[in-house]
Structures are given as structure tokens and as C-alpha cells.
Image (cartoon, rainbow, N blue to C red):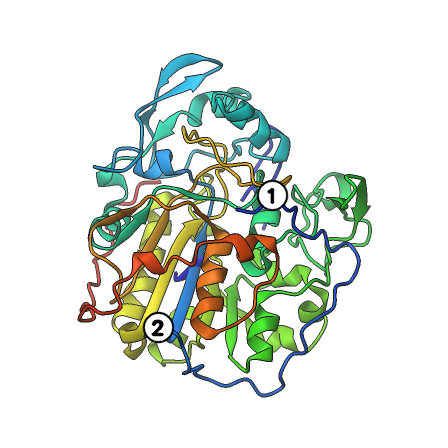
């Protein structure tokens, strides 16, 4: 999904969901000055630096580069990892589901896995011992492999934050996490909560770290500027497709944690049901900038079937390729955090929040270079920087200010490439 950016828990052995700048990013615990939104954004955002009129940022769940593309020819992948200093082969993983238990991938879990750059602390209990040191092979992700071979695969792309979903999804819309390192607490009475946002039950909190390094508990509801605010000011329309509040996966609806979106009419204008995405693509309704977060069942979170998740991504990308918007679209596909899986590349530590552990990046576009492995360092703020540079917007924080804009993954002088829709897999195991 041209914008498809979960760690549900930071404790091992828990069950699944219920039905480069050294300047730290602003914590934004207090309200930040907001960009005034426009009441009449344009539909097309036609004035662009490059021939790209649509950006789709698709964020899937919980995979590392070595887990998905560790065997991809020419890429910086490995088939052997390290477990507390001991060499350990990466054994074949499953393109089905690993079962109901989640692999630990909280903030502390991520820092432990990183182990000051030694990348050998991923084994953190029974579930991680079974699954962290596994990887998929070409036949288990044939469509992702095809796009990596025919378009651009980034092998130096990192999650923005050490830790799980909540901070990383916030980085994907705002180049900061509001000071949060981890998910909001989902313990006790809040274990069945289906939101990480402003509509969370009273008493549900998230730990944030202020500019002086002090921790405090706050509601998971912030008021800092986002990319949507920059687009509003420039009268460029945008949308964030995500699960509805009553659907699994709503925790990844990042704008639910932004009060001036969630608690105003902007919510219904810009945050749309992900179940309507393909219909809206077919009717040529996508705005210039679109984020996509899937429902849990097709997210590729390891507790759910990976093959079905890849099929869902294929439906979305095929729909774009078959639509009029293909001719001027850039699709960025990535995964929101490492999910507890092994990766061997130490992430650069540019500030107190990240980078997090490496994740894959796919760049799919009629202007994307063909068969290129991109070795440039990037993170989720790089996609924001591409949007900003394409439409002439300012930057939000030090992160997108320092980010590469990914323009090197395109050849805008080439003849636009024709669509290349793929077939769905018919052999998805349980």
C-alpha cells in the first residue's frame, strides 16, 4: 500500500488481540502550535516537483528484513544469526500463523535484542526461542519477492523507533512519537481495549519521556502537528485508511491519538474504513496522499496468516495498477516494527528513540527504478520527506528534516512502466 505502515504487548508469553540528526525529536507532551487546516483542500494537488501525483504509504506488521528478504540475491541478508554470541542458523519460518502467543517486541525487548549493536539478544523466552530465529523463503512470499525483483527493495531501511507499533505509527504520520517509547498499557481492566488513542478508556495511559528525560503517564492523546496538517495548509487532500473502532487493527489507526483530528470533523473527513479502500481505488477516489493500515487479520502480524496478508496487499496494489492513478503513483510498502524477529544490521542510534530494528521497504511505481537494491539509510520519516519535497511542504521535526527523500529510487526521465498486476496465492495454509 503505497502507505502501509504490532507489537501488542511488551511481555513474553501473552496472547494476541481480543475481538540522521542527533537532536532528539520534540516530545510534544504539551500542545504544539498547529498548522491551520484548510476547510476546502484541493482534490488533486497537481503542483508537484516530480511526476508523482499520488503517494500511497502501506504499513504492514512485525517483520524484519532478514525474516522476509534475508535470502534475496544481492541484498544484505543473512541465513545465520547470533544468540548471546553463539552462531544460530535462521531456520525456515511459516507463511501461515505462529499461533496465539506473541513474540516479545516491546521497547525494552527491542533494546535487549539490539544489545548495543551486537544484535544477539532476540531470544527472550519460549516463544522467541521458537520463532525469532526463523525466516521465509522466496516461495513463501512470491509476490513481495516479485516486486522486490522488478522494482526497488531497500535493505537499509529502519523502523523509526526502538520498540513496538504505537510510537512507530506515530512517526509515520508526524516524524515523532510524542515522547512515547512503547504501546499504551493494556493490562487489567484495559486488556481488551481496542484503541491506542484519544478514545481509550479513562485510566489507560502511555509512558512518555520529556525533553529532560523524565517519565510520566499521560493519556494516549496528543496535539502535535502531523503531515496531515501540512497537507491541509497547502490545500492538498489526504486520507488514512484503517480499521474501524469495532474491528481488530484499530490500534494502528494513528490519527486516533491526535486530538485535533480524532475529536473534530477532520476525523470523518480524512480517516476512512480500510474495508472501502479497494472500492475507492476502483472509483478513482484516492486523494493525493494516502496512508493504509490493514485490519489485523491481513496485517502479517505473526499471529495471523502471512499468505492471506500478502494476498490482501496484492489486491490493493493490483487495484492501483489497474486504475487511472497508476500512471502517477508512488507506493511505499513497509512493516511497522521488527515484531521480535532476528535482524543482523545494527540500527543507527540517531537520538533517544531510534532508529529501531531494520524492516524491508518496497518502492513500486511506473517511475521506480527496475531491479534496484537501495542501500541508502532511511526510516518512516523518509516517506514523509518524499511527500514534503514533492509538494513543497516544510518539515515537521529534526527527523524528517534530516531524512533522505527516497527520490534516488526513481528515474523520472524514464518512460513510465506499464502495470504488472499479480495473481493471488491459492495455497494459503492455516
Q: Position of residue 245 (x, y in %)?
A: 62, 62
Quarter occupied by residue 81: top left
For image coordinates 80% across by 39% down, the residue present is 214
Around disc 2, counting alpha carbons within 10 Å, would you say few (fewer than 14), some (14 to 19), or many (20 or more)?
Answer: some
Tell me if I can see residue 9 in this picture.
yes
Q: Which residue is mark 2?
A: 50
Q: Residue furthest bottom?
A: 40
Give the labeled residue for mark 1: 22
What's the distance in space between the residues labelled 2 and 1, CA to CA?
Answer: 30 Å
Of labels 2 and 1, the one closer to you: 1
Camera-side residue: 203 or 426?
A: 203
Viewer can see residue 13:
no
Element on which disc 1 rests? loop
Q: Is residue 265 above or below residue 21?
A: below
Q: Quadrant of residue 125?
A: top right
Q: Is disc 2 in contact with disc 1, using a CB cutoff of under 8 Å?
A: no
Side (left or right) of 259 relative to 248: right
Residue at 62% over, 83% down: 38
**Vertical arrangement, residue 84 with respect to residue 27, above or below:** above
201 lies left or right of 105: right
Sequence-first tag of 2 and 1: 1
Count all numbered tags in the image, as a single digit.
Answer: 2
Residue at horizontal 60 percent and vertical 43 percent from the top:
22
Q: Position of residue 356 (x, y in %)?
A: 53, 39
Identity of the residue furthest to the top in this view: 86
Mark 1 crowdedness (10 Å alpha carbons): few <14, some 14-19, many ≥20: few
Image quadrant where residue 398 sits: bottom right
Image quadrant in which the N terminus is located: bottom left
Amino acid at each position: 500500500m503505497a502507505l502501509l505502515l504490532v507489537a501488542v504487548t511488551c511481555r513474553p508469553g501473552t496472547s494476541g488481540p481480543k475481538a540522521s540528526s542527533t537532536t532528539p525529536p520534540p516530545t510534544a507532551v504539551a500542545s504544539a502550535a498547529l498548522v491551520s487546516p484548510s476547510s476546502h483542500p484541493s482534490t488533486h494537488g497537481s503542483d508537484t516537483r516530480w511526476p508523482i501525483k499520488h503517494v500511497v504509504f502501506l504499513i504492514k506488521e512485525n517483520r524484519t528484513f532478514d525474516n522476509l528478504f534475508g535470502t534475496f540475491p544481492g541484498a544484505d541478508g543473512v541465513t545465520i544469526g547470533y544468540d548471546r554470541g553463539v552462531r544460530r542458523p535462521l531456520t525456515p519460518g511459516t507463511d501461515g500463523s505462529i499461533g496465539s502467543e506473541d513474540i516479545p517486541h516491546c521497547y525494552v525487548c527491542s533494546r535487549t535484542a539490539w544489545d548495543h549493536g551486537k544484535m544477539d539478544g532476540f531470544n527472550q523466552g519460549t516463544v522467541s526461542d521458537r520463532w525469532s530465529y526463523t525466516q521465509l523463503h522466496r516461495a513463501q512470499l512470491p509476490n513481495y519477492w516479485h516486486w522486490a525483483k522488478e522494482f526497488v527493495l531497500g535493505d537499509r531501511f529502519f523502523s523509526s523507533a526502538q520498540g513496538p507499533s504505537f510510537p512507530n505509527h506515530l512517526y509515520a504520520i508526524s516524524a515523532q512519537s510524542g515522547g512515547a517509547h512503547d504501546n499504551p498499557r493494556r493490562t487489567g481492566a484495559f486488556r481488551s481495549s481496542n484503541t491506542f488513542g484519544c478514545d481509550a478508556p479513562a485510566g489507560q495511559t502511555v509512558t512518555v519521556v520529556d525533553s529532560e528525560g523524565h517519565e510520566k503517564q499521560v493519556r494516549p492523546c496528543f496535539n502535535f502537528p502531523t503531515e496531515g496538517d501540512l497537507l491541509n495548509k497547502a490545500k492538498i487532500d489526504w486520507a488514512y485508511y484503517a480499521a474501524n473502532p469495532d474491528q481488530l487493527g484499530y490500534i494502528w489507526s494513528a490519527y486516533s491519538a491526535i486530538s485535533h483530528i480524532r475529536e473534530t470533523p477532520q476525523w470523518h473527513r480524512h480517516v476512512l474504513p480500510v474495508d472501502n479502500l479497494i472500492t475507492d481505488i476502483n472509483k478513482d477516489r484516492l486523494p493525493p496522499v494516502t496512508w493504509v493500515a490493514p485490519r489485523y487479520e491481513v496485517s502479517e502480524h505473526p499471529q495471523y496468516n502471512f499468505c492471506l496478508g500478502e494476498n490482501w496487499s496484492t489486491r490493493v496494489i493490483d487495484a492501483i495498477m489497474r486504475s487511472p492513478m497508476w500512471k502517477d503513483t508512488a507506493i511505499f510498502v513497509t512493516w511497522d516494527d521488527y515484531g521480535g524477529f532476528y535482524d543482523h544490521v545494527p540500527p543507527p542510534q540517531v537520538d533517544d528513540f531510534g532508529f529501531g530494528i531494520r524492516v524491508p521497504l518496497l518502492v513500486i511505481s511506473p517511475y521506480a527504478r527496475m531491479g534496484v537494491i537501495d542501500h541508502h539509510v532511511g526510516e518512516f520519516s523518509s516517506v514523509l520527506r518524499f511527500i514534503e519535497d514533492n509538494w513543497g511542504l516544510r518539515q515537521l521535526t529534526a527527523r524528517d528534516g534530516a531524512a533522505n527523500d527516497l527520490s534516488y529510487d526513481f528515474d523520472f526521465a524514464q518512460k513510465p512502466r506499464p502495470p504488472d498486476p499479480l495473481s493471488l496465492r491459492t495455497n494459503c495454509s492455516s
